[in-house]
Amino acid sequence: GSGQVVKGVHYIAMLSVHDTSDVIFDGIILRRNKVFDDAMHIIYSKNIKLKNSRIQNAYSDGLDIDISRVDISRTTVTESGNDAVDLMSSRVTINQSRLIGSGDKGVSVGEASTVVVVNSLLKDNEIGLESKDGSDAYIINTDMLNNKTQINAYKKNWRYGQGGRVDVNKVFMLGDRNVIKADKHSRI
C-alpha cells in the first residue's frame, strides 16, 4: 500500500501508534485522509486511550487496531470507506461512542479479538458488528439502527478453528429487516 517508511517501519495511516504503551489521545480530530489508507492505526501497543475524538471520512478504516489493547470512549467515527473500527488479535472497549455510515462494518472483530461495545450507537453501516475467527464481541446497552446487516458472525480463516461469538444484552435494533446471521461455526 501507500505510506511512508521511517527507520524500516512502514506507516500506512494518517496517525500511526506503533509499539508503545500508556498514551491518551483526548479531543483529536482526523478527517478526509487521502494519501494513507487508514485514519488511525494502532499496532503492538497497550493501554492506549482514545477519547472525546472524531474521525471523519477515512479513506479506508477509521481506526485499525492490530495486536493491541485500546479503550475508546466518547468518540465518533463517521463515513469511513471501509470499517469504522477494525480489530485484529486485540482487546478493545468501545464506550459512549458513535460509529456511523461505514462502507463496510461499524465494528469488525477478527483473529481472536475481544471487544466490549457499551452505551454506544452503530448506525447506517453495511454491517453493524461482525465477529469472526475465534473472536468474542459483547454488545451491551447499545442502539443498532439501520445497519443493512445488524450482526454477522462467521468463520473466515480455517487456522482459527472456529467462527465468531457475539453476546447481545439490552440492545435496541431498528431497521427494514433486522438481519442477524451466524454460520455453523459461530454463535450469537
Image (cartoon, rainbow, N blue to C red):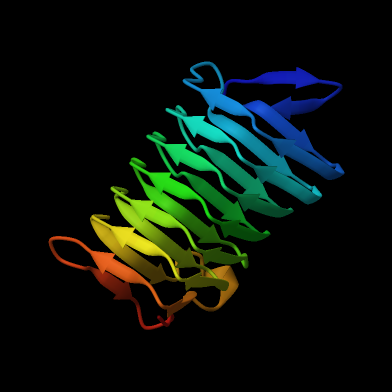
24 left or right, relative to 177: right
Residue 166 as seen in the image, left or right of residue 26 = left
Residue at 37% from the left image edge and 44% from the top image edge: 100
Task: Compare residues 47 and 108 and report the one nearer the observer.
Answer: 47
For the C terminus, which image quadrant? Answer: bottom left
Percent x, y for residue 60? Answer: 46, 33
The image position of residue 97, as x and y in percent, is: 51, 50
Q: Is residue 39 left or right of residue 126?
A: right
User: Horizontal and vertical percent for residue 82?
Assistant: 41, 39
Question: Residue at (70%, 41%) from the top-left corner?
Answer: 42
Q: Closer to the camera, 144 or 92?
A: 144
Nearest the camera: 112 or 78? 78
Q: Residue at image x 49%, y 63%?
A: 119
Question: Which quadrant is the N terminus positioned in?
Answer: top right
- Relative to 80, is 115 above or below? below
Question: Could you say which quadrant of the image residue 18 lies in?
Answer: top right
Q: Quadrant of residue 39?
A: top right
Residue 30 versus residue 63 in the image, above or below? above
Instruction: Provide residue 59's location: percent of width, then percent of height.
Output: 45, 27
